Amino acid sequence: MNILIVGLGEVGSYLAKVLSTEGHAITIVDPDLQRIRRIADLLDVQAVHGDGSRPEVLDRAEAHAADLLLAVSNDDRVNMLTCLFGKRMGAKKTVLRLRDTSAVRRSKTFFRKNLQYDVLLSLDDLAAAEIVKTVFQGQALGAENFAEGKVQLRRFQLPEQGPFVGQMVKDLKLPVGVLITAIDRDHEVIVPGGSDDLRAHDEVFVLGEPKAIAAFEKKIGARQAQARRVVLFGGSRIGLQVGQTLQREHVDVRVIVEDREEAEHLSESLKGVVVLHGDATDLHLLHEEHVGEADAFLGIAEADERNLMSCQLARTLGVRRTVALVHKPDYVSLYQQLGIDVAVSPRLLCAQRILGFVRSRSISTIATIEEGKAQVLELEVQAGSPLADKKLKDAGFPRGCVVGAITREDGTVLIPRGEDQLRAHDQMVIFVLDGVVDTVLALAGVERE
Amino acid sequence: MIGQLVERAALVAQIEAKTKEGALKELLAVAQTAGSFPAKTMKGLQKRLGEREAIGSTGLGNGVAVPHVKGDDVQAVTLVLARSKAGLEWQAIDGRAVHIVFLLVSPANDPETHLRCLRWISTLARSADFRRFLLDVKDEAAMRELLREMAPKE
């Protein structure tokens, strides 16, 4: 694949290293001459020196021949222009990395149409979703979040004896709002039909709203290991997003913020959540707030050092799980050695998501299951597509795939049944076995690379 | 083309070196013995491999590393596939020790072939079945047989 990477920050250079080793033809663009020379020489990639938001620079980088253009610099404005010009010049697919997505979020369709990106990735959103995931990791073997956390895919192992073992899928009395999308039986992934039965030790992939999934978890007798009390340190955009999601899921959240203005802003945005203005490395404060009794401590402020230190203190007080936000990806492996349970690096998450697109040859891929035996795709019902206005059961989806969730243009989320009707601009989350990925993509009018 | 690469590949059932640097040197020497490049080129290639690792590890995760280098004096694309039972510290993406090393040495004037080989290697590296079988088989002959099975039909 011809891949054009604009911006050699942490995300761009990480991708250049991995993708060149995986045999892709890479061109890099960056305004820093020294940085670009060193990387170009050692990685065997084409290099173009210059500002990637300028058409003549993109022209020199042969944007017209790019199968995939990655606008991943640290500057939102540069990335927007890069995407726009790149697409106009003929780049087949574009990925836009934004730091601040608040504007785009208000009018997704407008921005998508005018900036012409295919995928939008925000470091803050990716990090917030990952942090929430760590809090909700109960008995689930793994969890993925879609539609900004409103839909989850979780994996459970069925116990030896349980309510569903030995029953056929069509007879299961599942909680409303969950769907069994697939079964992993001895490393073989199957999408079950109504007459397939569930067996002990099957790993089932359950998709649905978080609350409904919790009900499923309870029903199969999995122990409720989910965090109930969480202390969050940090008042950034990520902190706000995590706080809002946890509150929605009825987790008892306490927030510690060091900056007074930020504390005030946050307590207005997070109604009903205790927001404390103070120093998260002040042992006295941590004691007073009974931080040691919390199920999880999230150190997600701006400064890596503060996050690390507050997590370590919380740990010594007895917190069960510590999660730290790490802005410098090189530190990630170090954190685990320092006793932090989970280190979340937004840049690494972003790079890994992009790697997933390239490896599955489809930018619609949002998660990969069992090393590619199945994928989770996010596809839009395009206006004028033959899918629009069809009932799901008549839309022609092949065996081996399940439409697990639909997000409507107005933001409502639906776990659909066969009778539900698809509409233009619906975002579908689809669980697909590898063998039928091409068929499903074609049905949605998407070309595979 | 992959077929030729497989038939000419040099196979090492057990890497002797205990470190990444040692392993790179050992496998480069295997490639040299196999006639990939003249002895005088050895030092230069080794230096480049080291520099490449310094800016970012070639450990792709799941216990696999793919160091690769191009040089002017290299005769033809050469693959050295090697195993390490104990595992080598490689600063890989996922922090795990490396048990499988694909060293690829290519002529500087054929970047297309170099990339095609790397693409094939990275699909092998991502196959859990391949990794498991490779670590299980007895000797070099069985390793080559497995590579033949995994080669695309041309």
Image (cartoon, grey):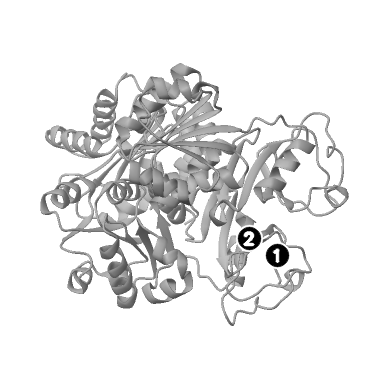
Compared with A281, A363 (above or below) is: below
Three-letter amino acid code at disc 2? Val
- Asked if residue A112 lies left or right of residue B36, the reply is right
Which of A78 and B103 lies nearest the eye of the viewer? A78
Quadrant of the rendered image containing residue B8: top left
State the residue at coordinates (43%, 76%): A113
Q: Secondary structure at mark 1?
A: loop
User: Which image quadrant: the N terminus of chain A?
Assistant: bottom left
Instruction: Sort mark 1 into few (<14), some (14-19) or many (20+) by Cα contacts within 10 Å.
Output: few
Whichever of callouts 1 and 2 sits on the residue coming sooner in the sequence is 1
Q: Secondary structure at mark 2?
A: helix
- Asked if residue B41 lies left or right of residue B25, the reply is left
Which of A20 and A170 lies nearest the eye of the viewer? A170
Q: Which residue is mark 1?
A: A398
Compared with A201, A174 (above or below) is: below
Q: Which residue is mark 2?
A: A436
Three-letter amino acid code at disc 1? Pro
The percent coordinates of residue A60 (x first, y second) are 19, 69
